[in-house]
Amino acid sequence: MSGNSIGILFRVTTWGESHGKALGAVVDGCPPNIDLTDSEIQAELARRRPGQQSAASPRQEEDLVEILSGTFEGKTTGTPISLIIKNRDADSAAYEGLRDIFRPGHGDLTYAKKYGIRDYHGGGRASGRETVARVAAGAIAKKVIAREGIEVIAYTQELGGIAAKEISLTEINNNTLLCPDQKAAQRMAEKLEEARKQGDSLGGIVAILVRGCPQGLGEPVFDKIDADLAKALMSIGTVKGVEIGSGFQAAKMTGSECNDPITPEGFATNHAGGILAGITNGDEIVIRVACKPISSIEKTQRTIDIDGKPATVSIRGRHDVAVIPRIIPVCEAMVSIILADHLLRQLTLAGNGGT
């Protein structure tokens, strides 16, 4: 098992490295006759593309996607869809000094121990650049779930300890940080600039909402939809925690506070976050993910070299100060991929006599 694929019926495999010739994805199991063109995928990739704000990496990648297979005359054919995004602005020279150094917070040490070899150019397969393939595949997944009226929306909940207080989804696209609170977004931007000048980085929290999800998605016992969503989101390199509904706050509640009363009109509250016993209950799915600070920072850090000797390192090159907001379309993509997979599994069950 290589760990490069996710999904059962809607299956996505990503490939490629940060400083290789290209990255891409193969999507198998997409239903036929869905409208799909390069430009539709391109729109999603544009949201993840670097170099769009002062605190983001200045690496200028156009992230142009090309569909190599699986479509005919602008529609999916039901056969595997192969996608490729070529790297055009990789600068490997900045990494030559890291050939014999393990960077703190990165996968350098663990990859070397697992494989006995590592690509020190930009982190190779462990780089955040790998997520471009996820977003491309996620664009297809969004098309699949949209046919059933399912919509996935993510936004910046918190950045550098500054939290959004007023949640207005109409505000998300009115600022570069994709924050639903305009005042909080301004403070976040100031905090980012401060961290950039100090050669440091910031972490944050992304909130993800799923609207229009039908009841019944999810497979007991080990393929609960919340378990699959958590796995998919935790597979993103920056994510260190996932909570659904009230999450960790539920541990502080009593049962009478945490249980969502059921009325003829539906659930009176949504502490469950739209999922009960691993199966969607028809309510809005609410997820939050904790993203660690970017590991590549200019501040001097202690580490070791490949011989195990003490060393120090200061990471130069072109790096983000925070994964937010570029991680937001990645989170949407992973949630959409899981929803597409479970939707197709449920439709198969219904076709075999399930409800």
Image (spheres, grey):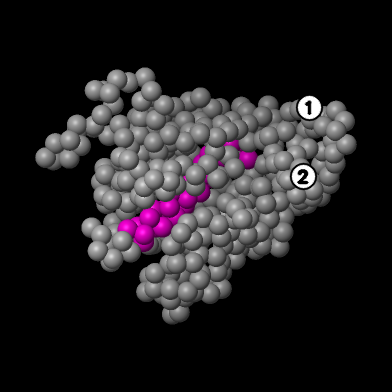
Residue 15 visible in the current orientation? yes
Position of 21 with respect to 34 (left or right) is: right
For disc 2, the marked residue is 112
Position of 267 with respect to 250 (left or right) is: left
Residues drawn in magenta: 320-346
Please determine whether, in this image, residue 253 is positioned above or below residue 7.
Answer: above
Seen at 88% across and 36% down, the residue is: 307
The label nearer to you, 1 versus 2, is: 2
Residue 56 visible in the current orientation? no
Q: Amino acid at mark 2?
A: Ala
Query: Residue 8: x and y, percent?
Result: 46, 59
Q: Residues within 10 Å of mark 2 (few under 14, many from 20)?
A: some
Query: Residue 263: x and y, percent?
Result: 14, 36
Residue 302, numbered label: 1
Seen at 52% across and 60% down, the residue is: 12
Q: Looking at this view, is 236 or 169 the one in front?
A: 236
| Marks 1 & 2, CB-CB < 8 Å contact | no
In the picture as drawn, the residue positioned furthest to the left comes out as 264
Q: Secondary structure at mark 1?
A: strand
Query: Residue 9: x and y, percent?
Result: 43, 62
Answer whether residue 290 is magenta in the image.
Answer: no
Q: Residues within 10 Å of mark 1 (few under 14, many from 20)?
A: few
Distance from disc 1 to disc 2, alpha carbons, whole Å, reads 18 Å
Please determine whether, in this image, residue 1 is positioned above or below residue 123.
Answer: below
In primary-sequence order, the first of circles 1 and 2 is 2
